[in-house]
Image (cartoon, rainbow, N blue to C red):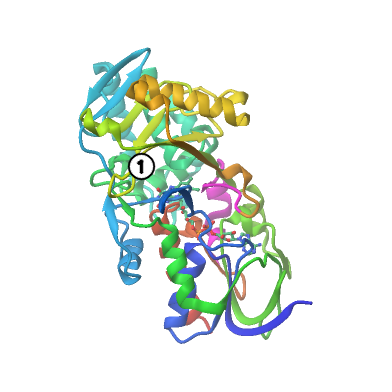
Amino acid sequence: MTEPRRTDVAIIGAGISGLTAARRLTQAGRSVVVLEADDRVGGRTMNLDVADGVITEGGGQWVGPGQDRVLLLLDELGLQTFTTYIAGKSIYHRRGRSKRYDGLIPPLNPLALADFAQLQLRLERMARTVPLDVPWTARRARSWDGVTFGHWLDANARTSEAKAMVTMGFTVTNAEDPHTTSLLVQLARIRGGGGIDHMLNITGGAQESRVVGGTVRIAQRLAEDLGDAVVLDSPVREILQDADGVSVRSARVEVRADRVIVAMSPADADRIHVTPSLPTRRAMLQRRWSSGTESKLFAVYDRPFWREQGLSGQAVSDLPVAQYVVDNSPPDGSVGILLSFLGTAGSGSGQHWPDEILDDPAARRAGFLADLTVLFGPQAATPTAYLEKDWTQERWISGCVGSRAPGSLTQYTDADRRPVGRIHWAGTETATTNQGYLDGAVSAAERAAHEVSTTR
Ligand SMILES: Cc1cc2nc3c(=O)[nH]c(=O)nc-3n(C[C@H](O)[C@H](O)[C@H](O)COP(=O)(O)OP(=O)(O)OC[C@H]3O[C@@H](n4cnc5c(N)ncnc54)[C@H](O)[C@@H]3O)c2cc1C
């Protein structure tokens, strides 16, 4: 038996987007019920326990300038941020040699550096012609949507070193191989993310700050205020619309509402059966949506020993596992944590992680520690703990950062956010700026809540 509930707005998904939409609607005087499939709130944000109250974040963790919606929400919820540790020299390791450097760009050889600059200049110039609200109307939309970002890089990079650098940067931020994303989608992301430097930078960029206690505190604080309006362990299976309202059927509750907001990626929304059927463009978009997926690997030490050697903890390498490393220690530095990312695709140009690294936890741990030892010396070989979060194993979340294959943006245009009768769409994938980021999840929620409040 499911419990019947009546509310103004049913919201599906208790990630940051669904919960923010619920807050904004409650503030506007509407009643809400939020239905979450999992036994926790937060979706793609979550904490991993390290020890003695110390946490590290398994999902989204950084915020930065220009991400105004999430920064304002943090303030509103009374949550503090702290600056990502980046003091000291970073390490660039390639072909068996390590160099130390300051700033964002590793010391590539001069030809590769010039190549990186021309790639960046051209991408940014193309991105400026893509209108954020309607990227499919860009003058060259069809040809850019007809190829992948990786294909464009293959054709336009003149050195393997610059190509590897661009590929690595975007594999970490998008959690997928550039050969799976449309060039047009990538250009819209570059424009909506504030440009390439901003997307890749720590200081002054999207990785500048972290949230004290972890970004999952955002969802937890939102849920605390919503009380029993949030129902966990209740996957939604079906939405039925009629002339008078909408019925939302989940495992524990059946909600009758005036409107519903689906707050998750289009790929995840595809698991919900909708009657009457969704318009073709929306149905196809959901089916063809792909999500990049990566794991986060953490080595924990009794202290951030690299700082004593004047190192920032940041490293860029062509080593098998630790290709991008960053200091992920807690704000007080009470323990040292080094973080790296492992995607499903491989981060170097044309490079793919071998099956044993992807599928064998012991081999992955050994490979990660071996690489950290090359980068940071013998102390890195003996962490006090090793943790990882593999997003391929989630039941209700199909990836880290959503994406569109070539052709999908020009064919399905605004089907990601165009309401279908009483159904409205939120989730970071529907944002026009900072799409894929926490900030996009918040702005999408506010846009959907506004739509619901203003539609008769
Ligand atoms: C490894 C990783 C690193 C990242 N790094 C960053 C970063 O540093 N900075 C940044 O800004 N962003 C980062 N992101 C992205 C950021 O975490 C997401 O953009 C954001 O959390 C998405 O929030 P959302 O509410 O839109 O979606 P989600 O968090 O995916 O929420 C959707 C919710 O819907 C639930 N759900 C799914 N199906 C159903 C159903 N049928 N019924 C009911 N509930 C359902 C899910 O369980 C989930 O809780 C990262 C993400 C990952 C995974």
Residue 416 sits inside the magenta stretch: yes
- Return the residue found at the far right: 1
> Under tag 1, what secondary structure?
loop
Q: Is residue 93 above or below residue 283?
A: above
Amino acid type assigned to the residue bearing label 1 in the image: Asn
Q: Is residue 220 above or below residue 265?
A: below
Residue 101 as seen in the image, left or right of residue 451: left
* Residue placed most toward the observer, 326 or 143: 326
Q: Which quadrant of the figure contains the N terminus?
A: bottom right
* Residue placed most toward the observer, 142 or 448: 448
Q: Respond yes or no on whether mark 1 lies under 8 Å from ligand 1.
A: no
Residue 412 sits inside the magenta stretch: yes
Residue identifier under label 1: 328
Residue 426 as seen in the image, left or right of residue 381: right
Magenta-drawn segment: 397-418
Q: Identify the residue at image location x=50%, y=22%.
A: 350
Q: Tally the marks.
A: 1
Residue 135 as seen in the image, left or right of residue 352: left
Residue 232 is drawn in which quadrant? bottom right
x and y percentages locating residue 333 in the rendered image: 29, 44
Q: Identify the residue at image location x=42%, y=58%.
A: 440
x and y percentages locating residue 162 in the rendered image: 35, 23
Residue 416 as seen in the image, left or right of residue 331: right
* Residue placed most toward the observer, 384 or 149: 384
The answer to whether residue 368 is seen in the rendering is: yes
Q: Is residue 303 above or below residue 319?
A: below
x and y percentages locating residue 160 in the rendered image: 39, 18
Q: Is residue 16 above or below residue 245?
A: above
- Return the residue found at the far top: 96
x and y percentages locating residue 421 in the rendered image: 62, 74
Q: Identify the residue at image location x=50%, y=43%.
A: 142
